[in-house]
Amino acid sequence: MCRMCWALVVVLGISSGFMAYKFILSGSVEKSDDGRLAIQLTNGERDIVFTEMRTFLESVQQITQGVASKDFDAVAKAARKVGRAAQQAVPGTLVGKLPLEFKKMGFDTHTKFTQLALYAEQLSDGEQTLEQLGELLQNCVSCHAIYKIETTDNQ
Ligand code: HEC
């Protein structure tokens, strides 16, 4: 009888390990024709991600303009808008669908914007800001090279 218990424990252990892998590490992804991993989201979830993306782009534009006009308050303000503190609460279902690597890169991007804001305020050094921006943009490039979004809703 207890052998059965152990067998059950092992089976449950393996399957919950698999579930943990599936939901925490890999998220909800499919292979796609262009070689990227396609994250499977509903239209609403995609809209949340895209809205954040467009805010990223807007901040990059404002930071670049701020450096050109040596307005480091504007640089810091634009960077803070997408910094760690501005990170929005994301619905749990969406969090579960995003691969761990995606979340790490996203989190790191917010962190780098916060760092850029701090340096801009303290140093007011355009070259420093551009160097940080260049490094940060590497995250955008890497993530876009690996992932895309597909919607699971009928359209
Ligand atoms: C953690 C991953 C990740 C990071 C980091 C990231 N993006 Fe994205 N972004 C995506 C994905 C995935 C898409 C959807 C691409 C697709 O489906 O082809 C996207 C789409 C976009 C879009 C299109 C939005 C729309 O409304 O169509 C813009 C603009 C964008 N990203 C800008 C940026 C900028 C600027 C950065 C860096 C500051 C950045 N992203 C960082 C994953 C990321």
Image (cartoon, rainbow, N blue to C red):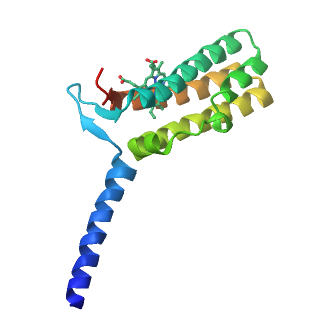
Q: Say left or right for 8 vs 115.
A: left
- Position of residue 30 measured from the top left corner of the image (x, y, whole percent): 25, 37
For the point 30% across and 71% down, which residue is it?
13
For the point 77% across and 23% down, which residue is it?
124
Work out which quarter of the rendered image holds the N terminus and state it. Answer: bottom left
Q: Say left or right for 123 vs 26.
A: right
- Position of residue 155 measured from the top left corner of the image (x, y, whole percent): 30, 20
Q: Is residue 108 above or below residue 35?
A: below
For the point 55% across and 34% down, which residue is it?
109
Residue 105 in view of the camera: yes
For the point 63% across and 31% down, which residue is it?
113
Dividing the picture into quadrants, the one containing residue 35 is top left
Q: Nearer the viewer, residue 145 or 38?
A: 38
Callout count: 0
- Position of residue 21 measured from the top left corner of the image (x, y, whole percent): 33, 55
- The outermost residue toward the front is 154
Q: Nearer the viewer, residue 32 or 79?
A: 32
Q: Say left or right for 25 vs 90.
A: left
Dividing the picture into quadrants, the one containing residue 89 is top right
Ligand 1, seen in the image, is in the quarter at top left
Dividing the picture into quadrants, the one containing residue 15 is bottom left
Residue 138 in view of the camera: no
Q: Is residue 8 above or below residue 70?
A: below
- Position of residue 53 measured from the top left corner of the image (x, y, whole percent): 51, 24
